[in-house]
Image (cartoon, rainbow, N blue to C red):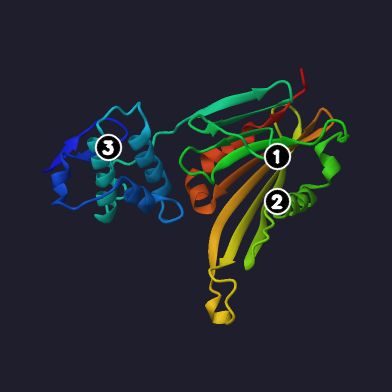
Amino acid sequence: MAGLAIVHHKFSLLPSSLSDFNGTKFTSSSIQYHYHPDANKQAGATKKFKEITAAYETKAFAVPRRTAIALMISSYSFSHANLQNTAFALQSVGLKEYIDTFDGYSFKYPQNWIQVRGANADIFFRDPFVLDENLSVGFSSPSSSKYKSIEDLGPPQEAGKKVIKQYLTEFMSTRLGVKRESNILSTSSRIADDGKMYYEVEVNIKSYASNNELAVMPQDRVVRLEWDRRYLSVLGVENNQLYELRLQVPENVFVEEENDLRQVMNSFRVNKKT
């Protein structure tokens, strides 16, 4: 295959030089944006976005900046040549366990996610590249809550109504022309290997906003979709407290990463404090 070099890393095909593109100029930011979940809804776009960003930023992928840019251009060019499935498979990053013995919970999370400060959460992790993809854990006050079991919330369907009401309260906007649409996708209960019952709630929330909310004429107030997200909650009770693990992910990213996200959900446990 003329003009291509074989590189045995996360990618198999790289252009041997930038001149292979007949002088066409590309920038890393424009190529990353091409695959960003907000800009590209095609299957596999999120994985490619993360691969390209990681390859460009990580020190572990020790190649010159010029080669990294070449790698990104090759990804971009292959997509336009209808080679969507050529050498772009992202290896599973694996899961890492987080255990909080002081507050009484544990879970697993993608090991490349980073811990950051999150409002109203005891712990907060997010994807380093898709910032809308994140995880948090919160729990009720130990001094004011007296939960005996998760069934104190009622059946899963009732718990789902409480969860979505809490979401909409948190996401309430004071901006003119903003509208939120919410839908409970599923509610369920399960007995985990620790013998405890957990509730799972899945919700979709869409946010719409006008691009000219102060316009006088209705036709000038064009409403557009701001974001479309899946929220997955796992609820459990221990230490007389209600615990919630919450995952937030753009809907188009969820389609690609559902298996990994469900492993995170299934890993959540509430434990006796030590």
Could you tell me the amino acid type at mark 1?
A: Asn
**Local crowd at mark 1 within 10 Å, few (<14), some, or many (≥20)?**
few
Residue nearest the observer in this picture, 90 or 141? 141
The dot on residue 68 is: 3
Callout 2–callout 1 Cβ contact below 8 Å: yes
Q: Identify the mark at residue 269; answer none if there is no mark.
A: none
Residue at 51% x, 44% y: name it: 131
The image position of residue 89, as x and y in percent, is: 35, 39
What residue do we see at 59% from left, 71% from top?
213
Q: Is residue 148 left or right of residue 22?
A: right
Question: Dot 3: few (<14), some (14–19), or many (≥20) neighbours within 10 Å?
Answer: many
Q: Does residue 81 lie above or below 2 as drawn?
A: below
* Nearer-N-terminus badge (2/3): 3
- Name the quarter where the C terminus is drawn: top right
In the picture, measured across the screen, residue 202 lies left or right of residue 273, that is left
Residue at 66% x, 32% y: name it.
Answer: 268
CA separation in Å, label 3 and label 1: 38 Å
Q: Which mark is residue 170?
A: 2
